[in-house]
Image (cartoon, rainbow, N blue to C red):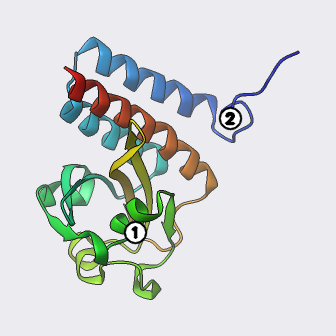
Amino acid sequence: MLTHSPLSASLLTKQQLLLVIAAQTDIIRKHLDAQGAMERMAELATELTFASGAVVEMVEGDEMVYVAATGKARENIGLRLKAAASLSGLCIKKGQVLNCKDSDNDSRVDAEACKKVGLRSMLVVPLRTDGALVGVLKVFSSKTEAFDDVDVQVLELVASIISAAIASDSTE
């Protein structure tokens, strides 16, 4: 009897899966460290979700720090946000995917940071290593309601690759 993996029942296209596999191969072939993997996966997340940009944020104390970014967020690498006042921090606190459909009408977001980056909607996925929540992968758009359930699946897959790279880097 055949069993179905979470991906076999998903709405991801073959093309999307091939792009993910190609990115994984690229990481292995180039022997990318965690930082290189985060940068490569942020690029892939942007491409696969048609986002304006993507950010990998890591937890540092009570802050979330932009450590890798693409698109409009690239110039904000190093930006520090109070975790308690951001959707990324809430994602870490809850340990679940969060979708902001319109940042102008969502009290969970850091409105000033949203305006600085130029985003109106975002999808935030937690990064886990050895069960600990260590950061988030976030995609954002200048359009409202830009992300759907397929985008959630894509980001969860990409986030798992980032998490594996972080875990691998920390054991070396």
Mark 2, residue position:
6
At 63% from the left and 55% from the top, the residue drawn is 149
Decide: marks 2, 1 in contact (CB < 8 A)?
no
Q: Tell me residue 96's x, y (percent).
A: 51, 58
Left or right: 129, with 94 as reference point:
left
Picture coordinates of residue 18, whole percent (x, y): 52, 24
Q: Residue at x 14, y 55 (%)?
A: 77
* Residue for point 19% across, 56% down: 66
Q: Seen in the image, is 153 located left or right of residue 33?
A: right
**Residue at left offset 53%, top offset 71%:** 145
| Circle 1 SS class | helix
Q: Total of numbered circles in the picture?
A: 2
Residue 90: image tag = 1
Q: Earlier in the sequence, mark 2 or mark 1?
A: 2
Name the quadrant containing residue 115: bottom left
Name the amino acid type tagged 1: Leu
Relative height, residue 50 to residue 102 (above, below)? above
- Secondary element at tag 2: loop
**Nearest the eye: 23 or 99:** 99
For the residue pair 42 and 135, the one nearer the viewer reads as 135
Q: Which residue lies furthest to the front in this view?
A: 131
Q: Which mark, residue 9? A: none
Residue 40, x across and y down, in percent: 29, 34
